């Protein structure tokens, strides 16, 4: 059992998992700090155009991954994390002639946390036209990050989901941010995958429905026909 709050204090994960959590925490802080750099102006403009100011970015932990191939790698090596740990947690990758390199480069980055607030992975959006990667790039499956179980914003929404017996499911990181800033604090987002049975299990624990569904789950995906079908399938 892991306490998320209470008089007993937080129970920290043991062994190697603890080190992986710390690596993600350090990476999240690094990305958040870099959002203020001159290079990240394109990322700040992206946020501003969608109505998010610096305070909003700070609240949700939004950051920027530099374009260099090993900027994060060098920073985390300096904090005594090993290459194997960084590969295992999905922050860097090995391959080809380049050897080991940062997975996220030249992108806006959102930290993805579990219900207790630990950073388990990241979602990153492409910003540059010469980036030939996918529009959104997520942490791969790791000992911490299981995409079928992850809901972005669950750490911020869990109390209100339990209190209001309601969960609002949106599609993306900015949708979730907009919902919370608009007062819909029960909103969470899927992370590059469809809403599935593992997500249902996470929500049912928070809704405390003891086998008889008593809460409200609202799907607010995009309004086009394809997304309406997605919402209906999830429902």
Image (spheres, rainbow, N blue to C red):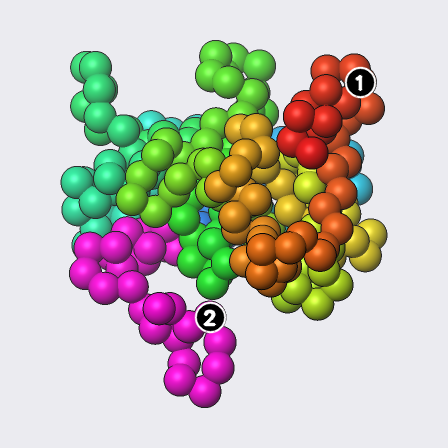
Q: Quadrant of residue 58?
A: bottom right
Label 2: few (<14), some (14–19) or many (≥20) C-alpha neighbours in 10 Å: few
Q: Is-magenta flag for residue 24?
A: yes
| Residue that mark 2 sits on | 4
Number of numbered discs on residues: 2
Answer whether labels 2 and 1 touch (C-beta < 8 Å): no
Whether residue 219 is visible here, answered yes or no, is yes
Q: Bounds of the magenta span?
A: 1-26
Residue at x-position 52% and y-position 13%: 130
- The answer to whether residue 217 is left or right of residue 112 is right
Q: Position of residue 2 (x, y in %)?
A: 37, 68
Q: Is-magenta flag for residue 42?
A: no
Which quadrant is the C terminus positioned in? top right
Q: Position of residue 89 (x, y in %)?
A: 29, 42
Q: Nearer the viewer, residue 99 or 15?
A: 15
Above or below, 228 against 41 in this view is above
Q: Position of residue 72 (x, y in %)?
A: 34, 41
- The answer to whether residue 129 is left or right of residue 73 is right
Which quadrant is the N terminus positioned in? bottom left
Question: Circle 1 sits in a helix, a strand or a loop, which is it?
Answer: loop
Is tag 2's residue or tag 1's residue first in the polypeptide sequence? Answer: 2
Whether residue 37 is visible here, answered yes or no, is no
- The answer to whether residue 204 is left or right of residue 29 is right
Q: Quadrant of residue 209?
A: bottom right
Q: Position of residue 219 (x, y in %)?
A: 74, 37
Residue at x-position 41% and y-position 81%: 9
The answer for how far apart the CA atoms under marks 2 and 1 are is: 39 Å
| Residue that mark 1 sits on | 224
Q: Nearer the viewer, residue 54 or 234?
A: 234
Label 1: few (<14), some (14–19) or many (≥20) C-alpha neighbours in 10 Å: few
Residue at x-position 19% and y-position 23%: 99
């Amino acid at each position: 059992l892991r306490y998320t709050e209470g008089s007993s204090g937080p129970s920290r994960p043991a062994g190697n998992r603890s080190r992986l959590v710390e690596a993600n925490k350090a990476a999240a802080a690094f990305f958040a700090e870099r959002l203020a750099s001159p290079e990240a102006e394109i990322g700040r403009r992206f946020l501003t155009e969608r109505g998010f100011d610096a305070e909003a970015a700070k609240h949700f932990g939004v950051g920027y991954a530099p374009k260099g191939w090993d900027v994060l790698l060098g920073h985390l090596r300096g904090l005594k994390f090993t290459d194997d740990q960084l590969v295992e947690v999905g922050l860097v990758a090995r391959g080809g002639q380049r050897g080991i390199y940062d997975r996220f480069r030249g992108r806006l980055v959102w930290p993805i946390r579990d219900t207790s607030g630990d950073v388990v992975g990241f979602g990153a959006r492409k910003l540059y036209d010469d980036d030939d990667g996918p529009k959104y790039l997520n942490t791969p499956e790791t000992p911490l990050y299981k995409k079928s179980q992850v809901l972005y914003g669950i750490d911020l929404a869990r109390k209100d989901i339990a209190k209001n017996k309601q969960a609002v499911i949106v599609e993306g990181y900015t949708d979730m941010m907009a919902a919370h800033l608009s007062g819909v604090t029960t909103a969470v987002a899927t992370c590059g995958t469809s809403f599935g049975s593992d997500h249902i299990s996470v929500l049912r624990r928070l809704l405390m429905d003891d086998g008889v569904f008593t809460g409200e789950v609202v799907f607010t995906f995009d309004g086009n026909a394809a997304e309406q079908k997605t919402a209906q399938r999830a429902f």
